[in-house]
Image (cartoon, rainbow, N blue to C red):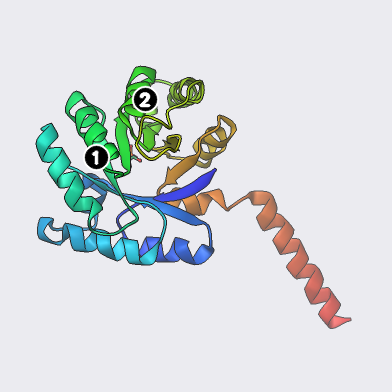
Amino acid sequence: MKFFLDTADLNEIKEVESWGLLAGVTTNPSLYARIGGRVDDFKKHIARICEITSGPVSAECVSMKRDEIIAEGRELAAIAPNVVVKIPTMIEGLAATKVLASEGIRVNMTLCFSVPQALMAARSGARYISPFIGRFDDIGEDGLEQFEQVVCSVKNYEFASSNGLGEEPEIIAASVRSSHHVTQAALMGADIATVPFNVLKKCVEHPLTDRGLDAFMKDWEKVKNQ
Ligand code: G3P
C-alpha cells in the first residue's frame, strides 16, 4: 500500500517528502480553506505542491454541471503532468469523468460511500476511487466494514478498458483518522491510504519502539563508560 498525504499544507508535504515515502497528495476544498487558501491562488498552490512531489496530486473540481466539471477538470489537469482531477461521485461527475478519462486525464472519484458508487466510478473511467472511512464512524457506522466491501467488489472485476488509460483503478482509503484505519485498509487490500499529517506521524510511533530505544541508549551509555 502506498501513502498519500491528505493536506494542502506545503510544510507538511515538504516534511513527509523528506521521509522518503510520499507517493502523492490529495486536497479538497475544506483542506484548502484550512490553510487560508484563496480562490485566485488555487491553481498556483496546486502547482507548488506538484513541485514538491512528482506523485499524483489530486485537485478538486467545485463545479456541479458536467460541462463545467469537464472544463474545470481540463484546466486543473493542465497545471502539471501529475495533477489528478478530483470529482465527487454523482451523475454529473460520472458523465464528466467519462469524457476526461477518454482524453487521458486521470480522475479521482471522491465522496464515495457505497459499493454501487465505487463500481459506477470505475465503470465511468475513474483512475482512483476514494471510499471514505472515518465519516461512517462519525455517524455511528462501521467505516472499515464499508471500505472492505468496496475493495472486494471493485477487485472482482476488470476496468482497465473503461478509463482510457489501460490501467486498473486504484482504491484510496480516505477519511483516515487513525493508525488502526491504516492497518486495516492495508489488510483489506487498499492500493493507497491518504492520511492526514498528524495521523501519519502517529503511524510511525509504537510504545515498544520507544521502550527499546530508551534501553539501547542507556546501555550505550554503559558501554561508553566502561
Ligand atoms: O480527502 C478526503 C478525505 O480524506 C477527507 O477526510 O477527515 O474530512 O473525513 P475527512
The correct choice, above or below, for 219 with respect to 94 in the image is below
Residue 77 showing in the rendered view? yes
In percent of the image, x 17 and y 28: which residue is there? Answer: 92
Quarter of the picture holding the C terminus: bottom right
Q: Residue furthest bottom?
A: 225
Q: Quadrant of residue 51?
A: bottom left
Relative image position of residue 60 (x, y in whole percent): 23, 45
Ligand 1's quadrant:
top left
226 horizontally vs 77: left or right:
right
Image quadrant where residue 68 sits: top left
Furthest-right residue in this view: 226
- Give x and y (percent) for residue 80: 28, 59
Q: Which mark is residue 100?
A: 1
Task: Give whichever of 85, 102 is nearer the camera.
Answer: 102
What residue is shown at x 44% (from left), y 23% (from top)? 150
Quadrant hosting residue 223: bottom right
SS category of the residue bearing label 2: helix
Q: Residues within 10 Å of mark 1 (few under 14, many from 20)?
A: many
Tag 1's secondary structure? helix
Q: Amino acid at mark 2?
A: Ala
- Residue kind at label 1, given as amino acid type: Leu
On the rendered structure, is 82 left or right of 100? right
Looking at the image, residue 190 sits to the left or right of residue 29; the answer is: right
**Mark sitting earlier along the chain (1/2):** 1
Q: Which residue is mark 2?
A: 118
Q: In the image shown, does 222 or 172 lie closer to the viewer? A: 172
